[in-house]
Amino acid sequence: MMDLDSVPKKTGRFSSFDGTQVYYEVRGEGRPIIFCYGIACLFNHWTHQIDFFSRFQQTILFDYRGHHQTPIPEEKDNLTIQALADDLIALCEHLNIEKADFVGHSFGVQVLLLAYKRRPDLFGHLVFVNGLYRNPFEAFLSAPDAVEVINQAKKMYNQAPQIFHFLWERGVTNPLLIPVSSFLGGFNLSKTAMKDIEIYARGVSAIDIRVFLTFFEQMIEFNQEELLTKIKVPTLIICGSKDALTPLDEQNKMKELIPNSELQVVPYGSHCTQLDFPEMVNLKIQQFINLKPRALHT
């Protein structure tokens, strides 16, 4: 995996709606394109895209609250997906962005949906990479069952937080458990570089388990199906044919519900198609945002 620091960048922080200091990075010049990673992920998930698009556009990344260089909010009620969407809107206002293209991966798609719902005027194009508009585990774990798993994890944490933290950090990064991490992250071991998976595992272990559980529970209960029919900007849906977390039938349904949308299935792609086949993903996104007229208004 190439180093993000090899591309010149500007870094900064801004005070969001509740005073939380949100960290961001800007690279390149031109039409802005903003990338939103998945739950408990990190900037490295977009390394290949940042390296490519920074040559032609202004690329922007930001850390979610409770992730890496953005702290957990003082008010715990503001640790929500809606708050992440509001941070994204505040980021655009801070950078004086009137309209941008937005790319979300996995959980990042849910962030984009809520941001679009509140400020559709900001959006020129939408790109969803391995994302869903509702509970991603419904196919093999119902929402009530998944919530029960989360509740049991919270109970274990409350009973022995230090032990739980130790097991969380050591378990996720243990080299012997990399196959487990690759499954949880949705990677294709035959296509994704082992270093990428190790970076993902370290990133997950760095997240406070309480933050992970909080967002995970909200992700399971998330459902914005009604919003999809109201999206009025050109939307590209990218998915992997081997992605068990966001199955193809759900991607097809999303394509049917969103007007003026396109679906690109990446053969052998996992839940992280942008890492499996970066050249294909980059070129498809570039072609889409360059050839599809941007939304002028919504």
Image (tube, rainbow, N blue to C red):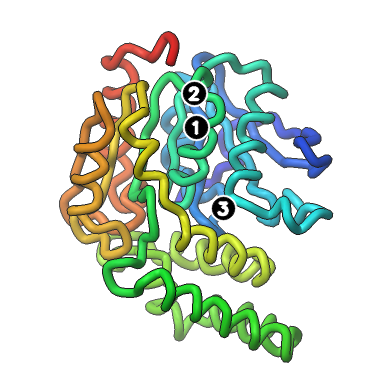
Mark 1–mark 2 distance (CA, rounded to whole Å): 6 Å
Please tell me the numbered disc located at residue 117.
Answer: 1
Mark 3–mark 2 distance (CA, rounded to whole Å): 26 Å
Q: How busy is the neighbourhood of tag 2: few (under 14 within 10 Å), some, or many (20 plus)? A: some
| Residue 14 falls left or right of residue 241 | right
| Residue 284 falls left or right of residue 205 | left
Quadrant in the picture for residue 259: top left
Residue at label 3?
42
The image shows residue 193 at horizontal and vertical percentages of: 37, 61
The image shows residue 25 at horizontal and vertical percentages of: 65, 35
Please tell me the numbered disc located at residue 120.
Answer: 2
The image shows residue 106 at horizontal and vertical percentages of: 41, 51
Tag 1–tag 2 contact (CB < 8 Å) = yes
| Disc 3 versus disc 2: nearer the observer | 2
Q: Depth check: 290 or 16 in front?
A: 16
Element at label 2: helix
Earlier in the chain: of badge 3 and badge 1, it is 3
Tag 3: residue type?
Leu
Q: How busy is the neighbourhood of tag 1: few (under 14 within 10 Å), some, or many (20 plus)? A: some
